[in-house]
Amino acid sequence: MNRVPVIAAVLSRADLLDRCVAGDRQAWVELHAVYRPQALSFLRRLGVSPREAEDACQEIFLQVFRYLGRFERRAEFRTWLYKLCISQTERLRRRAVLLGPVTWLRRRLIEPSAPPQWSETRAHELVEGALCALSSRQRQVFVLFELEGLSTAEIARLLGTPRPSVRRQLHEARTRFERFVREQPLRSRR
Amino acid sequence: VKRPDDPPGLLRHRNPTAPLLRAYLRATRAPQPDNDAGSDAAWQRLAAGLDAPTRPPGRWPLVTIRNGLAAACLAVWLLSPAAGSPERGGSDGVGGASGLATAAGGTEGASGAKRQSEVDPFGPDRL
């Protein structure tokens, strides 16, 4: 496998971070352009609606640019970005619990015919349904490992839990995920 | 890079759910930087936020007010004559001490809650 492009990409990324820390606005624009899609995808896979994901992404990048100087680069920048995404998702979830009745009322009164946001394809529905059936922590571990390709060691560090615990949560998440998919009809009833 | 002792990913071996996961990945993939029409607008919004004056971290007014209220409640509770009363865990000096210990536990809980709610992009394990 040719590792030269990979090494070049890592070096240019380090250089980009250096320029950002030095306050180079153009570097900030580049960093935002490169990592915003990753953050948006990850937020959506954690269950944040597309509209909320945009706002959450803004909030996350505000934190990135404010605290980038404190990032020690012992982990990949992407890992740190994912940590910020997880914190933001948990904040959104807490707020959703508090605003639950208001949101329900708004949906009933103001947006009675709003189309479901996650029903483009049956596969999408199924996976989203299965992910919703997981606990918040199980979903984080599952998405990070299966969809984002992080190792269990990286996930353990990111979530601040021991590695055996991550493996156990991954195993439980997989079992629940597969059971959910097995029990659902493959074709949509609509 | 996955460690050798990590289990194989569902996407990487023959698994009935792999096609579903691939479809989901495609559906949730955000537009790439070269093809992201919303990126510029998002950056403009972000730049406006970055240029807005910021409060120093750890000095958010709501947190300060909440902590102030918590400290005041704790002080009132500690100074109240019933601190060592039987309802609070004892009838004599020993009970009073036990009440105090509970109060200390309460303080610890409050500061723990503070740590959770404040913006801490690093957490206990610095990255």
Image: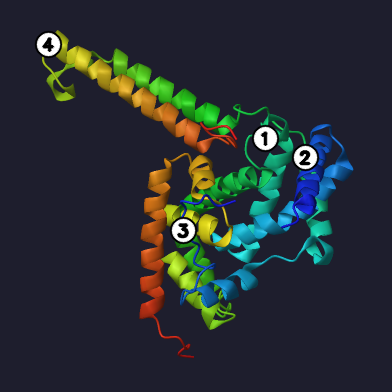
Q: Residue B73: in sight, yes or no?
A: yes
Residues at marks 4 and 1 on the same chain: no
Return the x and y of residue B122 as percentages of the image width and height.
58, 35
Chain of the residue that carries numbered disc 2 in the rendered image: A
Residue picked out by circle 1: A73
Where residue B9 sits: x, y (%)?
50, 62
* Figure check: A181 above or below B58: below
Q: What residue would you read off at disc 4?
A: B92
Crowdedness of circle 4 by 10 Å Cα count: few (<14), some, many (20+)? Answer: few
Q: Which residue is mark 2?
A: A14
Camera-nearest residue between B67 and B21? B21
Along the line of sight, which residue is nearer the eye, B101 or A186?
Answer: A186
Distance from the alpha carbon under mark 4 to that under mark 1: 55 Å
Q: Sequence-wise, which precedes: disc 2 or disc 3?
A: 2
| Coloring scheme used | rainbow
Label 4 in the same subunit as label 3: no
Judged by depth in the image, the label closer to the viewer, 2 or 3, is 2
